Amino acid sequence: MDNVKNLEDQFQARIDAGEKIEPKDWMPEKYRKTHIRQISQHAHSEVVGMLPEGNWITRAPSLKRKCTLLAKVQDEAGHGLYLYSAAETLGISRDEMYEQLHTGKAKYSSIFNYPTLSWADMGTIGWLVDGAAIINQVMLTRTSFGPYARAMVRICKEESFHQRQGYEILLILCNGTAVQKEMAQDALNRFWWPSLMMFGPPDDQSPNTAQSVKWKIKRKTNDELRQRFVDITVPQAEVLGLTIPDPDLKWNEERGHYDFGEIDWTEFWQVVKGNGPCNKERLKAKVEAWDNGEWVRDAAMAYAEKKNAQLTKAI
Ligand code: BYC
């Protein structure tokens, strides 16, 4: 018992000194499990996040827009793969993580359970969803677990391109016809509140934040990041000439931040528990893709085994 306490104290001292923890280092079991949970949820979010945008690849308004959206969606597949690899270093297999996703045991970001109804949603997802992801993930480049922090550096660079492509779509729509601007406003109206929910429950209702901050898994709390997102995004909406759908949104001179209205946490928990507008559709699409891709996985494995056998024979 004393021995474990000693190890835990040494571990905390390394964290406090700002050292990175690497996969083969000793770590408390809860630290390992928290990382598996968070990194795999993050990976699942990237992969499920391809679905709402994939919905618009065939309907993008021009070849240039189609190529850009395709590249963005492919980046997200890549982010999922780096993150699954980072989680694997903690002793969970990719098959186990997929199994957790496909059986509904694993979570992924609530935001991807909302439908994408118009082209303006592609702009709004880039602007708000990737914008929120960047704010969360820039902090994660300094997280204490080495493989996660390193994966985040590249992911953040790509997210920043995604955010700009989304904002540019909206700039064009907002400077276009009245109908185009209305489409942009409608997308903002639907995505604003779900984007604020992406940061997770309020700090006083977040079971994981205190320990995660202590272990420097999280460098900022859910509420701190949400506030930062609002402060950065409001002036961007002003440039677009769009109205944020919150009558309580107001600059607070004393705090040096925007005050904003009450988030509907009942809606958030409903979506997290699987009862959002698209939860069932998203999971069904993922499971079908997995089942339909079985022959590809089998063929790739058979090819790899044959190549290995040839190499072994040659040696
Ligand atoms: N959706 O104690 P808390 C992206 C769960 S998208 C669903 O605060 P934690 C992308 C939470 O898991 C962004 N579930 O938890 C962008 C926990 O349940 P469990 C993906 C949520 O982990 C564009 C419970 O609520 N980014 O990258 O300390 C295109 C209590 O919460 C949500 C990441 O995943 C939610 N929004 O903090 C494509 C970033 N919020 O697990 C892709 C990494 C909370 O105890 N993740 N829950 O059963 C994080 O930073 C943290 O995990 C969170 C939550 C801030 C999300």
Image (cartoon, rainbow, N blue to C red):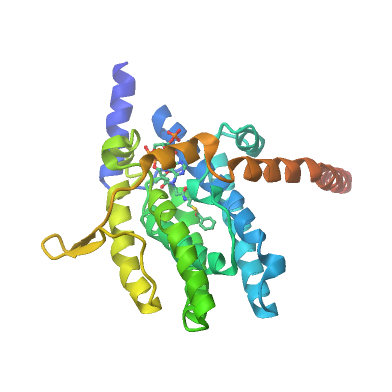
In the displayed structure, 134 sits above or below 263; it is below
291 left or right of 241 in image: right
| Residue 115 visible (yes or no) | yes
19 left or right of 172 in image: left
Please give the name of the residue rendered at 69% of the width and 41% of the height, measured from the top-left corner: 284
46 left or right of 54 in image: left
- Identify the residue at the far left of this view: 254
In the displayed structure, 227 sits above or below 237; it is above
Q: Position of residue 274 (x, y in %)?
A: 54, 36
Q: Position of residue 83 (x, y in %)?
A: 55, 49
Please tell me how many numbered marks the rendered image carries: 0
Please give the name of the residue rendered at 31% of the width and 72% of the height, measured from the top-left corner: 235
- Please state which of residues 47 and 17 is positioned toward the viewer in this rendering: 47
Q: Position of residue 40 (x, y in %)?
A: 53, 41
Quarter the N terminus occupies: top left
Q: Position of residue 180 (x, y in %)?
A: 53, 76
Please give the name of the residue rendered at 67% of the width and 74% of the height, measured from the top-left corner: 67
Please give the name of the residue rendered at 29% of the width and 33% of the height, measured from the top-left corner: 10
Q: Quadrant of residue 212?
A: top left
Quarter of the render that holds ligand 1: top left
| Residue 13 visible (yes or no) | no
- Please state which of residues 64 and 81 is positioned toward the viewer in this rendering: 64
150 left or right of 312 in image: left
Q: Quadrant of residue 76?
A: bottom right
- Identify the residue at the far top of this view: 1
